[in-house]
Image: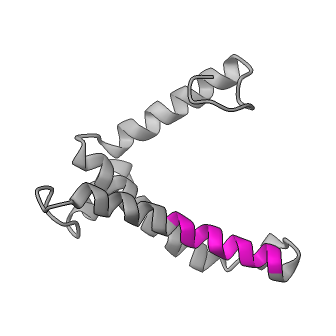
């Protein structure tokens, strides 16, 4: 599926942009969904000696999908197309790789 097509489909289930506090709702939702993924990873570390082969991949796909929904709707809220967000990210990473700056920390490395 094309990312912009996904974004448009996701928007069919989103609240209106002018709903009070909607950006805050989207940000909290994004953090919550990524937290659910982290929580499941923590349980694999705790209960299964970090054997990530034990991860329920279907469940992970659902949680990643929920995360993607929030990213798509949040991007639209600020007038960004998901294809453009993805392209910018790949260009940023390629530039870091070219410069040997993949590792390390900081947004502007």
The reply to whether residue 53 is in sight is: no
Chain part drawn in magenta: 34-46
Q: Nearer the viewer, residue 19 or 94?
A: 19
Q: Nearer the viewer, residue 50 or 62?
A: 50
Looking at the rendering, in which quadrant would you find the C terminus?
top right
23 relative to 33 in the view: left or right: left
Q: Position of residue 18 (x, y in %)?
A: 10, 56
Residue occupying the far right of the picture: 49
Name which quarter of the figure residue 10 lies in.
bottom left
- Residue at left offset 39%, top offset 54%: 71
Q: Would you place residue 88 above or below residue 51 in this image?
A: above
94 relative to 74 in the view: left or right: right
Q: Position of residue 47 (x, y in %)?
A: 82, 83
36 relative to 77 in the view: left or right: right
Name which quarter of the figure residue 53 lies in.
bottom right
Q: Would you place residue 101 above or below residue 39 in this image?
A: above
- Residue at left offset 40%, top offset 39%: 85
Report if residue 43 lies within the magenta region: yes
């Amino acid at each position: 599926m094309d990312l912009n097509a996904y974004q448009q489909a996701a928007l069919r289930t989103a609240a209106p942009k002018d709903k009070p506090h909607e950006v805050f709702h989207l940000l909290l939702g994004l953090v919550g969904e990524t937290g659910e993924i982290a929580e499941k990873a923590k349980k694999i570390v705790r209960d299964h000696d970090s054997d990530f082969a034990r991860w329920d991949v279907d469940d992970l796909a659902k949680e990643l999908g929920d995360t993607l929904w929030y990213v798509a709707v949040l991007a639209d809220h600020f007038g960004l197309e998901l294809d453009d967000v993805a392209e910018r990210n790949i260009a940023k990473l390629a530039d870091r790789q070219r410069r040997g700056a993949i590792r390390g920390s900081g947004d502007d490395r």
